[in-house]
Amino acid sequence: TENATLSAFCTRLTGISQEQVDAASPLGDVLDEFDEWLRDQGLVADDGSHARRFALATDGPWDLNHFAARECARKGVVTRPYMRQYVNVRKAFARVHRLKSARGCSLNAQLSRLGLKFDGRPHSGIDDARNIARVASALLRKRAVQVLRCNEACDPDWPGRYVSVRTYERSSRVPSMRGPKKLRGKRAKAKAAAATAASRNGTGARQIAGTSSDSTAPA
């Protein structure tokens, strides 16, 4: 651990004691235990691939990008595929409620807008997770399924920086976790027209080349 001794500020903020830090398991062991729990739930296969569609949900990019990704890189722990894309609930919340930006849309602000109060101790990991789940459940009740999906990803080249899911999936070194996306509307028509034109041009060129070779061939 980089900072093995907690400051008094950290203890006051999170409620974590020095005894808990000293008795905690290494990060790699904790992720192995989490992998086993995911397999027991039928979410992850033995090879680490997705057995069912699921995603981790966070309030902002910090937990997975600024903390988990950097710590895994520093300790040489391999990040799991399910850690590379996630649902930023704060961003999804801002979109559902048509806010100009997710900035300033804290977890307390989200709960307040839903008519709820924070349950537990702020900045306590388990209590934060439960309240994020409450916000996500409220979005699902609003039928915001299309919005509550992976909307950010960890940059594979720069631990600690996040990118859009589309940018992440364009990288040739990382597989898409969402499967093929069907194009609709104008984009689909434009792509189909371009493919048809390319096919016709290729056929015409082959016909011209064939006629030219036939005319010059000896009888």
Image (spheres, rainbow, N blue to C red):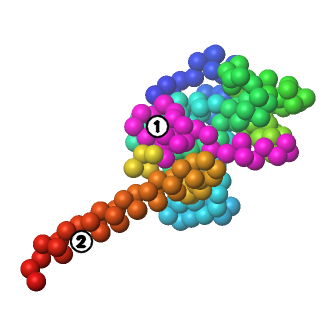
Asked if the magenta segment contains residue 151, the reply would be: yes
Q: Position of residue 216 (x, y in %)?
A: 12, 72
Q: Is residue 96 left or right of residue 187?
A: right
Q: Secondary structure at mark 1?
A: loop
Q: Nearer the viewer, residue 132 or 190?
A: 190
> Where does the C terminus fall, quadrant-wise?
bottom left
Q: Which residues are magenta?
A: 141-169
Pointer 2 local density, CA inside 10 Å: few below 14, some 14–19, many at least 20: few
| Badge 1: residue crowd in 10 Å (few <14, some 14–19, many ≥20) | many
Residue 65 in the image, given as x and y percentages of width and height? 53, 34
Q: Among all residues in the image, which is located at the extreme bottom?
A: 219
User: Furthest-left residue in view?
Assistant: 218
Quadrant of the rendered image containing residue 15: top right
The reply to whether residue 125 is visible in this rendering is no
Give the residue at mark 1: 155
Label 1 sits on what residue type?
Asp
Q: Position of residue 72 (x, y in %)?
A: 46, 39
Q: Which residue is labeled 2 in the image?
A: 210
Query: Which residue occupies 67% across, 45% down?
Result: 149
Reply above or below: 17 against 132.
above
The residue at the point 40 percent across, 62 percent down is: 200
Q: Is residue 53 visible?
A: yes
